[in-house]
Structure formats: structure tokens, C-alpha cells
Amino acid sequence: MIAISQLNILLGSLKYAWFHGQSVSALGLTHFVLVTCLILGMEYYHRRHRSGERHFIEPVKIISLGEFQRRVDGGEDLVILDDLVLNVANFKNSHPGGKFLLQHNIGRDISKFFYGGYVLEN
């Protein structure tokens, strides 16, 4: 849609220049160059931003269930998801289900909730 609108603007400016006896419209070419640079700049930014994504790294630290419970009792916001221990302290305020949902499940296995097998009610 954007490409079609930009093409229409360019063709309109060329048609305007033709009616006035000019071979090329400076306004049309300037518009074309600016839009092309803008699109290429956004593409460059997008590719650079994506290259900064972190890929999953296999965890190297293994903790026992007793260690997990001790850390939860010590105040850490940890949950278990598919045998992975996750710290959800930084995610609580932006969780789609709300802060209460994560706070209620601290120290538990949340796999059944994560995959939609159960609903937290009452």
C-alpha cells in the first residue's frame, strides 16, 4: 500500500512536470529519494535490532528441588516451566494475566497453566 501510494505521488509529479514542459520534476525526484532512503534506513535499523536478539542457551546450572525451595523461601520469585527454573521478578508487571497470577504461582510448576491445560479460578 505504501509503495503504491509513493508510486502515485512520483507519477503525479512527473505528469505535472510534463504539463509544464519540464522533463523531470525536482519535487518528484526529491520525494522518491527521501522515501527510498527512509525505507532503507528502517530496514537497516530492523535488521540491526533483530541481530541483537538472544537465542536460547542450554542452561548449565542444575539445582535440586531443595535448593529451589530454599531460594523461593528466601524471597526469590522463581517458577518451574518444563524442568527450567525461571526468575519472573522482572516480568510480573508486564505479564498479560496480571501480577496476581504470577505472584500466586511463585514456587510452583506452571507448565499446566502455560500450555492451557488448566485455568486458575478461585
Image (tube, rainbow, N blue to C red):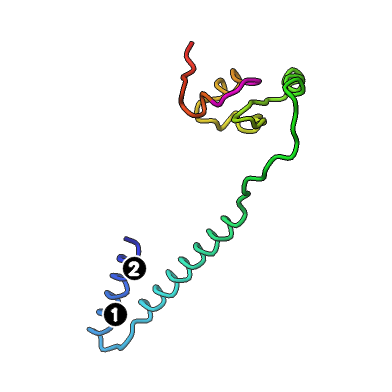
When asked about the image quadrant of residue 73, the answer is top right
Was residue 92 drawn as part of the magenta stretch in this picture?
no
The residue under label 2 is which amino acid type?
A: Gln
Give the mark count.
2
From which residue to which does the magenta span run?
Answer: 106-111
The residue under label 1 is which amino acid type?
A: Leu
The kind of secondary structure the magenta stretch mainly shows is: loop
Q: What percent of the width, then of the height, locates residue 4?
A: 30, 66
Separation of disc 1 and disc 2 at Cα? Answer: 12 Å
Residue 31 lies left or right of residue 44; in this view the side is left
Residue neighbourhood size for the residue with mark 1, other residues' Cα within 10 Å, grouped as few (<14), some (14–19), many (≥20)? many
Q: What percent of the width, then of the height, locates residue 20?
A: 25, 85
Residue at position x 50%, y 26% from top? 97
Residue at position x 72%, y 22% from top? 65
Q: What percent of the width, then of the height, locates residue 88?
A: 64, 30
Earlier-in-chain disc, 1 versus 2: 2
Q: What percent of the width, then of the height, locates residue 101?
A: 55, 21
Q: Nearer the viewer, residue 108 or 41?
A: 108
Tag of residue 6: 2
Q: Nearer the viewer, residue 69 or 90?
A: 69
The N terminus is located in which quarter? bottom left
Residue at position x 46%, y 23% from top? 117
When asked about the image quadrant of residue 8, the answer is bottom left
Tag of residue 14: 1
Outermost left residue: 19
When asked about the image quadrant of residue 75, the answer is top right
Disc 2, SS: helix
Residue 21 lies left or right of residue 56; in this view the side is left
